[in-house]
Image (cartoon, grey):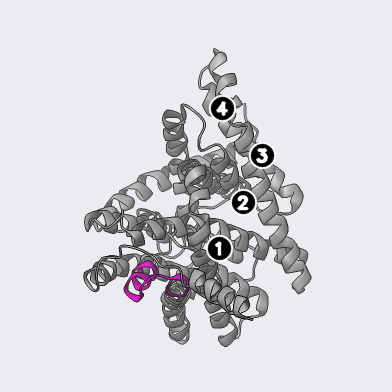
Amino acid sequence: MLNMGTEEALATLLQCFALALIFGKLLEELVLRLKAPPVLGDLIAGLILGPTLLGVYRVSEVVDVVAWFGICMLLFYAGLETRYRDFMKNIPRAGLITVGEAIAAFAMGVLVGLVFGYPLTSSLFIGAVLEATSVSVTARTLVEIDKLRTIEGCTILGVAVLDDVTSLVTIVACASLVRAHALAVTKVAEIMVLAFTYWLLVVIVFHKLSNYIPRIAYKMHTAESLLSILIGLFCLVAGLSRYLHLSPLIGAYAIGLALSEISGLAGTAEKVRSIAFIFSTLFFVTTAAKLDVKTALRPELVPFYVAMVLAAFAGKLLGAGLTSLIIGYPPHAALRIATGLFPRCEFCIVAAYIGLTYGVLGTEVYFAALMIVLVTNFATPPLLKLVFTRGPETREVKSRLGAVKELLIRRLRKR
């Protein structure tokens, strides 16, 4: 028999799971039919079930832990679906655009935070909220207008993959700074280098070893051997992140990417997907259910919300657009790439929630994150269709950096 404390904790978890999966999935279906990301349904469900409206969703420590397991599983699955070779192939040109758009979007968030009187630590988290891109809506729109395989479409997808990494590193670095109670430049650099080094080592080392995993699994006679080994490695790597004072999120994505090319993965990846989607539903419903949005609905906060939404668009437009233009994309192509990177989704919410959990952000920033997800995802499809109808088809990208390099070489030779 369970003791009273364990039985109560289990009952609370089961109740939250029931509410999250039933109401969350129903609202996911509703927003999906409106051609919006399903995660919006989970967030709306949390707002309805939590103290904002009904107050029937009780978030305990156990529920919170299981919810975090869900988001880690989702990132593990995202890594499995990325494909190691595609990631490496997209690094050169997409990497330059990613650096430009990530820095610009992050800087816009920090600027908004400082202008509205937030301390530097909070402003850094606001920058992390605005940095990440989610291209699920963009990808679907590009398919609908038959532009997914264009130069711009392939670039957008490549940047989105790399952007996941930069966003994770930024979120982890900000969280680590809060835990370390330090904002020195050297500490910031140390944490970011540590996070990226750990991520890179996990990806490279486990990718080298990944061929041996299916060989071992297929020799075993127990049920779901490969699935068990993959989830076991995910838990190991994500758990080890704690000992480096890093978030398990960064290890979860890294191990997924490292194992993304093992043989016979397709069927097993679908099983991971099912687990990830069930548990991540609990996460997104729980994050929204912990908030009382009524405290954020104050007239004096309207300018902040407007600034956050405008900054979400401006960061990608300036960063991705200008960087694309500088490295050789025609102006119309640079505008298309920037527009395709407007949407925000999961990482935007995760960054806001982590900041809220650490006490450096208030409910108004989380509410602003919800508004950004809503506005960017509904605005992007018509904007994307518009920019693809203006200007010619892009057939090649002439590197301006290469031209500058050749010009410098010629001048040096003349001397």
N-term-proximal mark, 2 vs 4: 4
Whole-percent x and y of residue 352? Answer: 54, 65
Amino acid, disc 2 = Ile
Verify CB contact (< 8 Å) between mark 2 and mark 1.
Answer: no
Image side of residue 54 versus residue 240, left or right? left
Occupied quadrant, residue 325: bottom left
Q: Is residue 365 magenta?
A: no
Q: Which residue is mark 3?
A: 205
Q: Which residue is mark 4?
A: 228
Q: Is residue 107 above or below residue 273?
A: below
Q: Residues within 10 Å of mark 3 (few under 14, many from 20)?
A: few
In this rendering, does residue 148 appear at all?
Answer: yes
The residue located at (30%, 62%) in the rendering is 395
Whole-percent x and y of residue 256? Answer: 55, 41
Whole-percent x and y of residue 92? Answer: 52, 58
The residue tagged with tag 1: helix, strand or loop?
helix
The residue tagged with tag 3: helix, strand or loop?
helix
CA separation in Å, label 2 and label 1: 13 Å
Please, which residue is most extreme toward the front here?
414
Depth check, mark 2 against mark 4: the one in front is 2
Which segment is the magenta one? 325-339
